[in-house]
Image: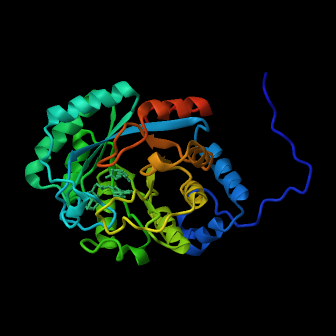
Amino acid sequence: MSLSPIAFHGRAAVSPVSTPSADDASVWNTAAVEALYGLPFLDLLYRAQTVHRQRHAPNEVQLSSLLSIKTGGCPEDCGYCSQSSSHKEAGVPAGKLMSSAAVLEAARAAKAQGATRFCMGAAWRNPKERNMDELTTMVRDVRALGLETCMTLGMLEAAQARSLKEAGLDFYNHNLDTAPDFYGQVISTRTYQDRLDTLRKVQEAGLNVCCGGIIGMGETRRQRAGLIAQLASLSPQPESVPINHLVPIKGTPLEGAPPLDEFEFVRTVAVARITLPGAVIRLSAGRESMSDATQALCFAAGANSIFLGSKLLTTPNAPVSADLDLLTRLGLQPAPAQA
Ligand code: SAM
Ligand code: DTB
Ligand code: SF4
């Protein structure tokens, strides 16, 4: 039996906010994005769900798996991160780069669990030349399993981005993290411009860009809007946009960040969906402490990717069985590979 849409004959009206057409990034300045945030919650969700259905399969969620291939001892001082050598109290010891054989084994396990993309993260400011052979071997091996590949290794030189692309890398993750006017309160060891420069090199190498940020670090709503406006203004817009909820980690400067209203997080997902209509929006860190209902609202707001696996980089993620159960309860299907 097919169901027809429910007609509504009452006082129908969605609150007015002009919606720029398609991917017209130039119109999404901070004020325009902040106006979206200010919509009544249900109007915002309706708009986001409408955009989502125009560009994406409505009931599909992309499944990625994450592995820390080099943990801890990072020279950067990102205030949220357990892996910075400035945050020893967080208790994450510095490790060495994993062997490509061990990475391949982890990728096999991720595929068996249902992931279609394997993301490899390293606690580096940037990869060294001496690491490149091992990194390109990892990419080739994981690609040969039939998985999409993603890496996040810090800043890249143009030649490094090209080598990774030639090896078969599909996506490079490098986040803007927050708005330019809040950034300096979170990180002092590299600039916003450094990040934009790496993103340009990644894009010029022909890699798909995965770029997003963290919500809940004590930023204002205007600063959240500032982050989304930056992401929406990237040209071309990123193919993948992780929206992380801060995981407050003991021993980091942001361990005591003020709690965020969960609806504000859902609003951020919706605003990202509307302003980045073609991107896959990844409901990224922080799901472990979210209720099933909040996650379902995030899917309704246009999130269509999650990390599957019981660990992120250094913090726990929801158990695989619980995630697969949630998808089943919501009638959501794993999406086919994107790249
Ligand atoms: N070192 C590389 C870099 O920073 O570009 C790659 C790894 S880094 C851990 C990747 C991203 O994870 C960061 O940009 C940040 O957005 C996110 N992240 C790290 N710690 C987090 C936390 N405690 N809560 C939420 N997101 C976090
Ligand atoms: C991203 O934006 N989020 C992921 C991935 N890119 C590498 C990392 C989340 C890390 C959460 C904190 C941790 O486990 O250390
Ligand atoms: Fe290093 Fe990345 Fe952590 Fe920043 S987020 S301290 S660059 S591992």
Q: Residue furthest left?
A: 130
Residue 190: horizontal and vertical position, in percent?
A: 26, 71
| Lateral position of residue 5 relative to residue 81, left or right | right
Q: Where, quadrant-wise, is the N terminus in this rendering?
A: top right
Which quadrant of the render holds ligand 3? Answer: bottom left
Residue 285: horizontal and vertical position, in percent?
A: 41, 51
Please say which color scheme the image uses.
rainbow
Residue 270: horizontal and vertical position, in percent?
A: 60, 55
Q: Where, quadrant-wise, is the C terminus in this rendering?
A: top left
| Lateral position of residue 212 relative to residue 60, left or right | left
Determine if residue 331 is in view.
no
Determine if residue 245 is in view.
yes
Q: Nearer the viewer, residue 79 or 270?
A: 79
Residue 257: horizontal and vertical position, in percent?
A: 43, 68
Q: Residue furthest top?
A: 1
Q: Nearer the viewer, residue 220 or 129?
A: 220
Query: Image point 35% across, 24% down: which residue?
Result: 112
Q: Quadrant of residue 193?
A: bottom left
